Image: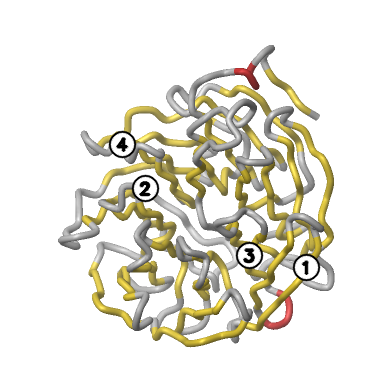
Amino acid sequence: MVSAEPGTNAGIEPRLLVINTEGNSVELLDASSLKQLAQLNVRAMPHEAAVDPRRQLAYVCITYEDGFYNHYENASHFLEVLSLDEFRHLRSIDLSPHWGPHGIALSPDLGTALITCESGGGELIAVDLGTETVVGSVSVGAHGPHWMALTPDGVKAYTANKEDPFVTVVDVASMTVTGRIDTPYGTEGIAASPDGSRVFVASQQSPHLYVVDVVSDRVEATIDVAEGPGAVTVTPDGRQVLFTTFNFPVWEDDPELGQGFFQTLDAKSLELGPRIAVGRFPLNVAASADSTTAYVSNYKDNTVSIIDLHALEVSTTMPVREGPHGIVHVETPVAHSPSARIVASDASN
């Protein structure tokens, strides 16, 4: 079902795509005001999304049929395909025998989707977006591969593994594991710099951010932060690393999730910016294409916050449907510009 204002697909302002896990829906918001432009109900428990601006499609991972990570009865094996110009569901891609899709990224030529899955003891799969079939898979050697990062040239993929003390490095062309990067407490958010030189990784159960050199695939710096970080992204200009903190403990049935925070890291000096209070369980973060604005999905508060990256303050917080999870910034109207630049989040829980 779609609800939309007349003519919203012909708008000229940047958009925000929000994936609501508990609301079983996808919302299209005005990126400046967070006013809802359209809403689409989808299959239960959607998590993450990636956008193909050339074909005006969104790919949404359906991770579970019920519950959440480590606490579910039935996993899902579907990738939903949505039309962005008409904002409607087109079809479902059955990923079987792979299941539990989480993080997703599209190759630079937009021909392949790389997706982390819980199946096979933890794996990374490749989906040909022309034939919409799985064409490759590789075990990442970890129980809980979560978010993933793809280098801008599409050569390497890195999986953040929630419950294992390493990040897995995958050569995309051959779909083979080429290394492991030691991260003692498991990892959550992960993002590559736009120049492809570094990968920034959030520790799952310790207050650290790791800075990984892409050439050596080794940790070159460890940044101490106030508490366990969660989601991570890098602004398109490469100057700032954006991350949230929520300390989500995977071993508790009903964890208490208090005040969440947003913070920046200068990508060159590695100096931290001030902590900015947002909502509870700020599960994901995205940046605008001009690198002036950050967007945070506050899962437990059912809100999205806008952060002004110049003033370093929250400028707007608006309610959305239940459990906002994945978040994608669409800079140019997808209905009229096949060359629109898309800045997408890399993430899921």
Task: Give residue 134's mark.
Answer: 1
- Residue at the image point whose x is 65% and y is 22% from the top: 9
**Category of crowding for the residue at label 3, using alpha-carbon neighbours closer than 10 angstroms: few (below 14), some (14–19), many (at least 20):** many
Q: Amino acid at mark 2?
A: Pro
For label 2, the SS is loop
Please state, as top left, top right, bottom left or bottom right, where the N terminus lies in the image.
top right
Number of the front mark, 1 or 4: 1
Which of the 4 quarters of the picture holds residue 185? bottom left
Which sits earlier in the primary sequence, circle 2 or circle 3? 3
**Category of crowding for the residue at label 4, using alpha-carbon neighbours closer than 10 angstroms: few (below 14), some (14–19), many (at least 20):** some
Nearest the camera: 107 or 249?
107
- Residue at the image point whose x is 51% and y is 42% from the top: 342
**Residue at mark 4 to residue at mark 2: CA–CA distance:** 10 Å
Nearest the camera: 107 or 275?
107
Q: Amino acid at mark 3?
A: Leu
Position in image of residue 164 (x %, y %): 51, 83
Position in image of residue 319 (x %, y %): 53, 30
Task: Give residue 269's mark.
Answer: none
Task: Give residue 114's mark.
Answer: 3
**Residue at mark 3 to residue at mark 4: CA–CA distance:** 28 Å
Position in image of residue 297 (x %, y %): 49, 43
Which sits earlier in the primary sequence, circle 1 or circle 4? 1
